[in-house]
Amino acid sequence: MMLPLYVTYPSWIHPEIFPGVPVLSLLRWYGLMYIFAFGTAFFVLKKLLREGALDSTNADGTLRKATEDDIFSFIATGIVFLLIGARVFSTLVYDTSGIYFKKPWLIFWPFQNGRFTGLAGMSYHGGFIGGLLGMIFWCWRHNVPFFKWADAMVTAIPLGYTFGRIGNFMNGELYGRITTAPWGMVFPHAEKFSSSLPWVKEFMAKIGMEAQTNLVNLPRHPSQLYEALFEGVILFSIIWLLHKKKPFDGFSGALYTGGYGFFRFFIEYFREPDADIGYRIAADSNAPIYMNTSLLNISTGQILCFLMILGGIGVAIAGYVIKKRRV
């Protein structure tokens, strides 16, 4: 008998931290992961503060030493702008119903059908734009060099981002395309397929899966964990190893922007696009979204990541040219 070549999503994992307890039903892992993410960002920034990475020179030539209060204020401003950008971008770019254009007040309304749901739906790229604007605003308000502080923030972001993707995994959402890889995972809320379809039978035979009903839930790439690893841990490691050797202010920002865009662009080939959007560019307009049939089928996320790669390269080139002119 063939052993199953896939993993079943753990039944003990629930979006709620205390499932079955009505009073505590609003406490969810995803929200807790946001707290971990922001806490991690604070501790990384605090270490950079001790290294003197956030100190700058005032207009009169005196030294302006950064403080913990600056860090709190900087992060708080970034969080507010990030959440606004992430929510607005998600509702106006990724939602295809058009309801948020007709009723924009619903963008930040945390109830649906009289039930508290929170702000379900956040966009990373919207958060990136919002957070960027927040940092620009804070640096302008406090008269400190933007690129120096932005470099510090992007050094802190990836490790915190890891927790966000773990939160997606705990929610059983943002899973990837179907796969025969032995680490493919059966997510409980993923789309099911008819077990009578020839391609489904062939797929099941490869992984040793037996149909219990007419509809089967096929294993998928745990793309949330791919992102947590590459866009989180690995990207953080690269930036951290180079943060003391950066050739100019803005280098870490360019490295983060381009690096995230690079990793995410390729991981998108394993992640399933939103069903109501599908591909923005497709070699085959009838290509299914639940499997990768062509590298020329491009999602919305990949287009935005490509723009991030170009932006990172542009900032790096501009920073290098400006430094050469000052020498």
Image (cartoon, rainbow, N blue to C red):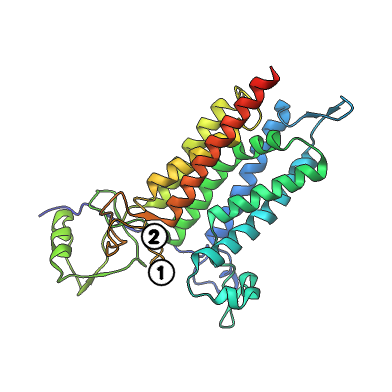
Report the residue at 65% width, 50% height from top: 131
Q: Which amino acid type corresponds to the residue marked 2 in the rendered image?
A: Pro
Left or right, 266 with reference to 313: left
| Mark 1–mark 2 distance (CA, rounded to whole Å) | 9 Å
Quarter assignment of residue 218: bottom left
Kind of residue at disc 1: Asp
For the C terminus, which image quadrant?
top right
Question: Which residue occupies the extreme bottom position in the image?
Answer: 113
In the image, residue 247 sits, relative to residue 189, either above or below, namely: above
- Specify whether residue 232 is in view: no
Mark 1 sits on what residue? 276
Residue 111 sits above or below residue 273 on the image = below
Is residue 92 shown to the viewer in this render? Answer: yes
318 sits to left or right of 67: left
Query: Residue drawn 19% across and 54% down?
Result: 4
Q: Residues within 10 Å of mark 2 (few under 14, many from 20)?
A: many
Say which mark, if any, is on residue 273.
2
Q: Position of residue 239 (x, y in %)?
A: 55, 32
